[in-house]
Amino acid sequence: WWRCAVVSPYVANFDEAQPHHLKPPAERPQHFYFHGGANNRGTYGYAFRQAALAQLQELASSHLSGIQLPAGAAPCRGAVTTNCQGGRNSGAFREHMARSRFNLVLRGDSPSSRRLYDGLAAGAPPGLVSDEIWAVGLPFQCLVPWRRFAWTVGEAAFVSEHGGRAELEALAA
């Protein structure tokens, strides 16, 4: 019965003025987008994000950035940036999300992430990289057909050499 319980999701960061969110995902110029914390708080989730972002450095046509890393921050650029300045509430965040075919949802300190809702609001189908998200992180599973529009890559792929990147490249092809 608990899978049908009401869960209050995060508030989506959405800008309806972005013209890209009206385009079907296949017509959008960026394959994947992720922008989020990957700090050094000592939790598995943030260590996982750091490892995943390091593996995805060469992922083509994507914008992936981790913020709040231990080293000094640099300005965000147009591809993978391992430690850049820029918040989730910025216009650049909303623009990149709206330009992306897929919203990469990397687990953080919990199995879910607010990026799931940001991407849904922008029309970018979620790519879930969180082994426990199906058990505890997706609300309304008895009503929302998550498996029809979301895809999953196991966390193990991202801790093996090039496994996660290879799966994302195959999806983008």
Image (tube, rainbow, N blue to C red):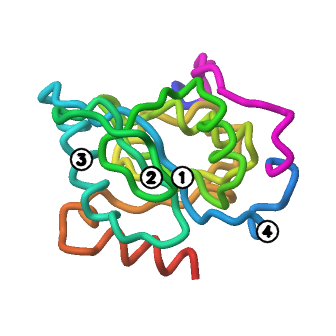
**Mark 4, residues whose alpha carbon is within 10 Å: few (<14), some, or many (≥20)?**
few
Residue type (three-letter) at the residue carrying disc 3: Gln
Q: Earlier in the sequence, mark 3 or mark 4?
A: 4
Residue at disc 3, secondary structure: helix
**Mark 3, residues whose alpha carbon is within 10 Å: few (<14), some, or many (≥20)?**
many
Q: Total of numbered circles in the picture? A: 4
Q: Position of residue 164 (x, y in %)?
A: 33, 68
The magenta-colored residue range is 4-20
| Relative to 54, 20 lies left or right | right
Q: Earlier in the sequence, mark 2 or mark 1?
A: 1
Q: Position of residue 129 (x, y in %)?
A: 40, 52
| Residue beneath disc 1 | 33
Q: Which mark is residue 143?
A: none
* Contact? badges 3 and 2 (CB < 8 Å): no
| Relative to 171, 65 lies left or right | left
Residue in the picture at 35% in, 32% down: 37
Q: Is residue 161 magenta?
A: no
Residue type (three-letter) at the residue carrying disc 2: Leu
Q: Earlier in the sequence, mark 3 or mark 2?
A: 3
| Residue beneath disc 2 | 64
* Contact? badges 2 and 1 (CB < 8 Å): yes
Residue at disc 2, secondary structure: strand
Q: Position of residue 66 (x, y in %)?
A: 35, 41
Dominant secondary-structure state across the stretch colored magenta: loop
| Residue beneath disc 4 | 27
Which of the 4 quarters of the picture holds residue 11? top right
Question: Residue furthest toward the front?
Answer: 75
Disc 3 from disc 4: Cα separation: 30 Å
| Relative to 43, 38 lies left or right | right
Q: Quadrant of the C terminus?
A: bottom right
Residue in the picture at 63% in, 18% down: 6
